[in-house]
Amino acid sequence: MFACCASAVLRGVCMSELRFTVDHEWLRAEADGSITVGITPYAQESLGDVVFVQLPDLQAYTQHAEVSVVESVKAASSINMPLDGEVVEVNSVLDDTPELVNEDALGAGWFFRFIPQDADAIHGLLDQDAYDRLIKANAQA
């Protein structure tokens, strides 16, 4: 777990507890050793209104493997496995209410949970500052 300060809270989520990928996925380490994955507010805003989410199968995946697809009125986007691990739970609520991704990307709109092959690997992903720099660089490109 990571330390949090009041200025780093967005929609009730402590942003310093999250890690990010260059593909705009967020990850949160849970107390039970699993990692929860969703897409960032930046990603869901870029996609527009989400109308469908294809969730992954409960199985092992290698890092960067396509595990999920999110479709919006504007585009479809692949969700890749952020680290080697086994998907152990999916947010089946998204089957009937994919709009939760837009309404609460950092909370109820999560996609899946997995057990990482290497529990420390999450620390090698982007922290909030690095992710903010990535977004800024994308905006300037």
Image (spheres, grey):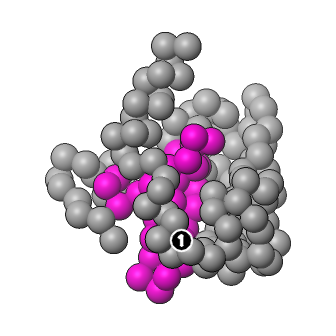
Is 36 colored magenta in this rendering? yes
- The quadrant of the rendering that contains the N terminus is bottom left
Q: Is residue 89 visible?
A: no
What residue is drawn where x is 30% and y is 65%? Answer: 2
As rendered, which of 121 and 89 lies closer to the eye?
A: 121
What residue is drawn where x is 40% and y is 39%? Answer: 130
- CA neighbours of label 1 inside 10 A, class few (<14), some (14 to 19), many (20+): many
Q: Magenta segment range?
A: 15-40
What is the secondary structure assignment of the residue under circle 1? strand
Is 49 colored magenta in this rendering? no
Question: Which residue is label 1 attached to?
Answer: 35
Residue 49 appears at what percent x and percent y?
67, 37
| Up-down relation of residue 135 to residue 52 (above or below) | above
Residue 106 appears at what percent x and percent y?
47, 55
- The quadrant of the rendering that contains the C terminus is top right
What residue is drawn where x is 43% and y is 24%? Answer: 136
Residue 110 appears at what percent x and percent y?
58, 61
In the image, is 12 to the left or to the right of 86? left
What residue is drawn where x is 58% and y is 56%? Answer: 38
As rendered, which of 42 and 12 lies closer to the eye?
A: 42
Residue 64 appears at what percent x and percent y?
73, 53
* Residue at the extreme left: 6
| Up-down relation of residue 86 to residue 125 (above or below) | below
Residue 129 picture quarter: top left
Q: Is residue 9 visible?
A: yes
